[in-house]
Each structure stands twice: as structure tokens, then as C-alpha cells.
Image (cartoon, coloured by chain):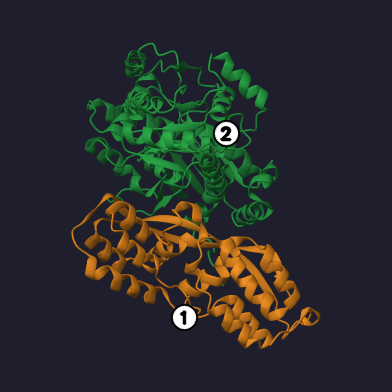
Amino acid sequence: MKLGAKSLDTKGKGVPFKFYTAYYVSTYSRRKAYTLRELLEGVKTADKNTLFHHVFHAVRAKHLLPPRYNNDFARWVGEEVGDEELAAALSDISGAEPATIEDIRKEIVAILEPAADERRGRSEFVFVGMEPVVVETKYVAHTLAEFLDLVEVVPGESILYHFVTRRVLRSAGRNDFSTWLDKNFGLAEVADELSRIDPLAFNSEEALREAILTVLKKRLL
Amino acid sequence: MIERYIQFVGEDEVDAIVKLAERLQDLSILHVNSTAAGGGVAEILNRLVPLMRELGLRVDWRVIRGDQEFFTVTKTFHNALQVGAVEVPRRFYEIYERWQEINANELDLDYDVVFIHDPQPAGLVKYRKRGLWIWRCHIDVSTPNPEVWGFLRRYVSQYDAAIFHIPEFARDDLEIPQLLIPPSIDPLSPKNVELPPTAVERVVQKFDVDPERPILLQVSRFDRAKDPLGVVEAYRLARRRVPGLQLVYLGSPAHDDPEGEAVYRETVEAAGGDPDIHLLMLPPDSHYEVNAFQRAATVVMQKSIREGFGLTVSEALWKKRPVIGGKTGGIKIQVIHGVTGFLATSPRTAAHYAVYLLREKRLREEMGAAGREHVRRNFLITHQLRRYLMAIAYVAKRAMWSD
């Protein structure tokens, strides 16, 4: 079902969508891995923020990773250990809803466990934690029209915060956009289609934004 | 002043910095280091402190004092912490402690948040009466002289948090939170502002370098850690495949570093009178010339064997020059292998990548654009400013989440 451009000035139940943005304080976790076995142990025991950092920062800052790797574990295994097969498997993990950080941990462990031996990286893997610092932006959407317009212009970090960070780290279960569209406007189908987007399929906020916009335009315009 | 950075990072980033600063308006903040001018820390504080004040923050900056003996001690500590194998006489520790006490008596340390930069004033924490104290380490202490680090660690452990450039420099033997903040370049500084092409050509010609032929450039001290002999060897190997290639190694005279002169002489000898090897010694404030050479270079090299952060890499990337870097220290987070340049582990691999880049103009342009974007997103002074504000918010446990 399409709403059409003429029907987007509705305010639904009247709850506005306030866009926030998040930046991340990086912290040293006091854990390093020199071998695949130590990497596996690190993944098993790292706190959720550390795991989140190493898996999702590829979406946040594409240029910190060669684009062929989707997360830090894949890069280390590929470039430092030299096992491209295992790196490819690690690059393929899914971060789509309703995956929590514990689901992602299980998936990485399942891939690493059969291969975790004493092979060493040319340099160590350093586990880095992070803590989000959330900042209010000037952007507020009261209507579907404003929401659609703002999704295109808010900072990329804001897209990632609402679509990924809060869901994964705050165990919100669902991304903020889907929650708002469903609860405030009853747009369950649009919400569901957004929820099917896997953020780990993208290596920049802009690519993720484009995927979200494509769904919104298709469903709303 | 902060508005001038909107052209580089956008209005939303600057808005976020303003909002973060609003959260910290009630706090008094102090920076303490060991020199007002000269050296990377003073350069950063000279830019950061005015920006923080402009955001309405109550920020002061104090410089510790000491006699020649004290600075000999701190220089020795510095070398012992970075290089490891240095003899440190016992009395050096007493001299260090005496000057901490003198400075603690003379300086007003009564602030809500105190940043102590580097080892020289680290011992001031012993005299803290209140406030949150953060030790900002600008050097690589990953493989230090154990005795000197053991001495310093007793002080550092008393801080509320420490900040290092990269995770590899952080310490497993510190229980306090360790934050990671890379340094930054200022796009508005004389070293990084845009230059007219004629000015670039003029500067290069002034030093007898031919702007019409390809230039391989390294900007760094004549220091073994920067591997100048490896750079000459890489150039030689590359020149066999790229006739007409010139090497410019741009350094500064190091009057306080006798080894620097020896390394310079060795490099001159290795150059063997090749007229296309230009080993230039420019005064430390030759920002304009450095800027011009980085813009004139076809490919930039930072072939260090050991490196603190290596901001010359970001300087070159900002000017859209791909960089061949040594796989060490902060170079690894600036040179993304195959994206913003290449990481090399020997003169041969450095030469291999140099030839590849010198031949492929389109690749140079793609990597140059990626390099500038990488710096724009990660290593500009506004990022460092935001990260400092976030560090304060984190240590002071100010609201992190929106709900």
C-alpha cells in the first residue's frame, strides 16, 4: 500500500520524532589476541560495547577498513593471519533485526570455533571498547513529510544511532524509525520492510541511509 | 573561529561540539604541559585552548617550569619510555620529584578537570586536592624502560583516566580507564592551507627540485626510527623502473640530538652524490615550505620503523597525496592499505608500491581522494576537540544516552 505525497502531512498520534546523534568514546579493553584461539576467547568474553565496536564501526567509518572486510575480526583474520576463507565467512555475518549483540556473538563464535588454532597474526588484535555519547540535533519531524525529508539530511551518525546503536546496545528490539512509523501512524508494513534491512550489508552510513530512503520513498510516495 | 571549520566538517558536526560544550559549562578545566611553544603538544594546545574558550568553557593552560637539570631528566625519561634501553641514574628520580613539588606549590591546580600532558608534569597528581585528573600521553609507552615506567606508573595510577593515541600504546598494567584519542591536523594552519600552484612551483624550484618530474617525498627528522637509509634504498629501487624520479627528504636540524647529525651524515653518504636526491634541512618553522613540498609530491613516504603517530601522514593525505607508510604506530590507522596508500615492511615493498603509484595516475587520484576524506572524517582538529569534550563527559559521568 502506498500513501502518496499528498497524504504525508499527517501527524499521526502527534508524537514527534526527535533526531539524536551519537559519537563514541573509544576505550582500551586491556585485552589483546595474538592467535586465532585468543581471538575466539576474546570474542566470547568481550563486553557488548566492545563487540559492538568491532562489528558495527565498519558501517560508521568505512575508511578505517579496507572495503572488502565488513568488520575488524574479518580484517585481522584476512590481513594479519592470512586466512581469506575464514575472513570471508566473518565478513558475512548478519546484523539484521532482531539480532542482539549476543546473537551476533554466537554467530562469530560458531564461525571461529572450528578454525581457532594457534595460528598467529603478524601483529596483535587489540580489543577496543566504546561508550556512546548522545547529542540532540536540531532536527525534529512532526509529520511523515518532514520525516522523509529529514532522513535525507540528518547527520549519518544520527541514522546509525536510531537504526542500529539503540536497537543493538539498548536491546530496543526494533530500530527507532520502524517503532515510530508503526506506533505513531500504524504503518506496520513500512516498519517491517525497514526492519528487514541488514545494516552490516553496508560499509557507510550513506549507503545505509540510501537503503532506508529507498524503502520510505517506495512505500510513502 | 569555530564556524570557519564548517566548510570542512559541516554544520551538524560543529553543532554537536557546541551542544557537548554546553553540557560542561559549569566545569573549570586546566591543561598543564612543559612548554608554551615548540613541539607537538604546545602546537595542539595553542589551537585547542582558544577553541574551547570560544565554546564558553572556562579553560586555563599552565606551563611547568624547571632548570636545565630537570629537563635533562625529563628528556632522558622520554627516551627511556619510547626507546627502552637507556641508563637512568638514581638521582634523576629525586630531581624529577623535587620539581613536581616546586611546581605544585607555584601552580593553581584547583580545577574541576585537570589534563596533565606527557610525563614531565605527571607527578603533580601527588599534590591534587580535588577534581578529576586525566593523564594525556602523547608518546609511545608500549615498550618502555621498565624501571622508568614503573616509577611513572605509580603516578599515572592515581589519575582518574589516561588518554593514548592508539590502542597499541595503551597499558595492560594500568587499572584506570584508558581512552583513545588520535591527534589531529588543523586545516587552517599554515602547514595545511590551500596554496596557489605557482607558489608550490616556486618553492620547489627554490630548492633545485624539478616540478616537471615525479617527486617521492618524506618529511621527517633524520632519525633512525624514520629509516632514512631505507628511504634512499627504496628510491634507488624505484628509480630503476621510473627514470627521472627525484627523492626529497625534508628534515630539520636537530641541535639537541647528536645522533641526528650522525644519521644525516650516513644518509648523505648513502645518497652518494646523486643529484636527484635532495636531503633538505629547513628551520623547524618552515610550515609554508613543507606545505608546498607535500603538494608538489607525486607520492609521499613515511617509511618509519617506529612511530608515535606520524601526523605528516595525515598532512599529506589531506593534500590528496597517497602515502606509503611503515607498518607501525599511528601510521596504521592513517594509511589504510590499498585505500589511502600502502603499508610497507621493507625498502623493497616500499619501492614496489612507489612504482605502482608513480605509474598509475588514476590510482593516485582515487587514493588521494580517499585519503583526504579519511582525514576529513577522523583527524581534523574539530574531531580532537569533540573527543576531548567527550572524554570530559565520560570521566565526569555526564549524561551519555538520550533516554
- Which residue is under mark 2? B46
In the rendered structure, the answer to whether residue B359 lies left or right of residue A34 reads right
Outermost residue to the left: A118
Outermost residue to the right: A6
Please name the color used to draw chain A: orange
Residue sitting nearer the eye, A38 or B15? A38
Q: Position of residue B364 (x, y in %)?
A: 52, 39
State whether residue A178 appears in this view.
yes
Provide the secondary structure element on which disc 1 rests.
loop
Q: Position of residue B103 (x, y in %)?
A: 43, 31
Which chain does the residue under circle 1 lie in?
A
Provide the secondary structure element on which disc 2 rests.
helix
Residue sitting nearer the eye, B134 or B65? B134
Which chain does the residue under circle 2 lie in?
B
State whether residue B119 appears in this view.
no
Residue drawn at point x = 52 percent, y = 50 percent: B387
Q: CA distance from mark 2 to mark 1?
A: 48 Å
Q: Is residue B194 above or below residue A69?
A: above
Q: Which quadrant does the N terminus of chain A fall into?
A: bottom right
- Which residue is under mark 1? A98
Residue sitting nearer the eye, B21 or B342? B342
Residue drawn at point x = 22 percent, y = 36 percent: B147
The amino acid type found where label 2 is placed reads: Asn
Q: Which one of the lettered chains is coloured green?
A: B
The amino acid type found where label 1 is placed reads: Pro
Q: Position of residue B144 (x, y in %)?
A: 27, 37
In the rendered structure, the answer to whether residue B168 lies left or right of residue A167 reads left
